[in-house]
Image (tube, rainbow, N blue to C red):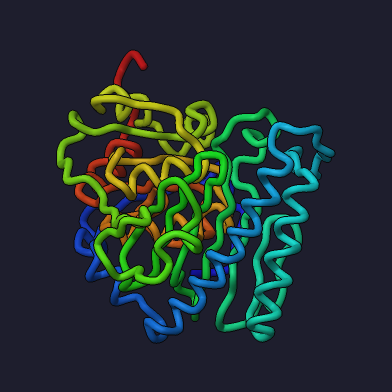
């Protein structure tokens, strides 16, 4: 996975169906991408979960309260909670692993050439957070040698959390944090403490699929998805669940696809591992994997090729 680049919205995103690797997905394939021992990845996971415990506390302390809000140069918003959470997470990671690199939304990249890098999105869904909508969360992903190894998505206002590591499966907690509930045994299929293994759906037809997306206007404006209206029309149901939650719903089998444009590496690092360990697939509109992509399709895997073909096809007459 290369360093993040801002893609040219005028550039085409080709999809070559003949060269598309239809086998590059599934739990066994995801496990083959592990770089390091299971014990090492679990240690990183425990730190990520503990960081999210602290982040949850900060976020909830500020949620639906008076916030100090600033506008960044890209015209997006940032709050004191965003900055405080990322600063705390960076401090904890470097205290435990001083040789690791960091890639964060608010404070940028540190030790870019490190073999292991942590991706931090302190509050994914900042606009929801500002407006009092509970769909926001902290995302942490860890990369080794260019391949994402684990991801945690923590949504404190929903009291839900999702996490995954290569070869370890994808998991969800309900009603509390993954660190404090069920943390003693993450290898069990389920536990009374509320930790449950999750998997993508087995839906194999677009006509039966629930389709999720960020902004449909941004998708169409990108010029990369002329067939988006036809895809929406072909699906059983569609809903605009943006940000991290769409990927979590795909990973746990509640939806078959999540589509976005304008995504950043810290938005995607954790969801990529979650979706792939749950048995799904994630790529840009051209079928390439990574976290440095301008467009994203996450799916249950079975529908991925059909989604890409339909997105890239010319719009039907009259649309």
Q: Is residue 107 above or below residue 80?
A: below
Given the current orientation, which residue lies at the most extreme front position? 192
Residue at image coords 39%, 27%: 239
Residue 25: give x, y in percent of width and height. Answer: 26, 62
**Relative horizontal placement of residue 7, taking residue 283 as reference (left or right):** right
Q: Position of residue 85 (x, y in %)?
A: 71, 56
Judge whether 141 appears above or below 271 on screen.
Answer: below
Q: Residue at x 24, y 52 (%)?
A: 301
What residue sits 69% from the left and 37% below the top? 63
Q: Position of residue 103 (x, y in %)?
A: 65, 66
Percent across and percent down for residue 77 are: 75, 39
Q: Quadrant of the C terminus?
A: top left
Q: Answer above or below: position of 279 versus 218.
A: below
Q: Residue at x 68, y 56 (%)?
A: 105
Of 87 and 208, which appears nearest the observer? 87
Question: Is residue 90 rendered to the left or right of residue 68?
Answer: left
Q: Nearer the viewer, residue 239 or 53?
A: 53
Q: Is residue 263 left or right of residue 224?
A: right
């Amino acid at each position: 996975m290369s360093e993040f680049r801002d893609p040219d919205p005028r550039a085409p995103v080709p999809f070559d169906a003949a060269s598309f690797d239809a086998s590059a997905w599934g739990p066994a394939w995801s496990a083959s991408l592990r770089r390091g021992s299971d014990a090492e990845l679990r240690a990183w996971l425990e730190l990520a979960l503990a960081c999210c415990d602290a982040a949850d506390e900060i976020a909830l302390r500020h949620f639906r309260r008076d916030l100090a809000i600033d506008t960044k140069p890209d015209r997006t918003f940032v709050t004191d909670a965003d900055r405080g959470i990322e600063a705390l997470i960076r401090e904890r990671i470097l205290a435990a692993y001083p040789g690791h690199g960091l890639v964060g939304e608010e404070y940028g990249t540190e030790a870019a050439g490190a073999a292991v890098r942590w991706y931090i999105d302190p509050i994914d869904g900042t606009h929801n957070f500002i407006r009092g909508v509970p769909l926001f969360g902290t995302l942490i992903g860890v990369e080794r040698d260019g391949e994402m190894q684990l991801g945690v998505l923590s949504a404190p206002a929903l009291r839900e959390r999702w996490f995954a590591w290569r070869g370890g499966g994808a998991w969800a907690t309900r009603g509390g944090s993954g660190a404090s509930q069920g943390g003693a045994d993450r290898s069990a299929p389920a536990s009374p403490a509320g930790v449950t293994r999750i998997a993508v759906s087995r839906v194999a037809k677009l006509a039966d699929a629930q389709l999720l997306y960020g902004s449909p206007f941004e998708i169409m404006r990108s010029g990369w998805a002329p067939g988006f209206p036809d895809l929406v029309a072909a699906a059983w149901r569609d809903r605009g669940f943006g940000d991290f939650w769409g990927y979590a719903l795909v990973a746990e089998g509640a939806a078959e696809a999540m589509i976005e444009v304008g995504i950043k590496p810290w938005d995607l690092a954790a969801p990529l591992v979650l979706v792939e360990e749950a048995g799904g697939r994630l790529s840009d509109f051209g079928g390439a994997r990574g976290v440095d992509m301008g467009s994203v399709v996450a799916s249950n895997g079975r529908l991925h090729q059909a989604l890409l073909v339909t997105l890239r096809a010319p719009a039907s007459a009259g649309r």
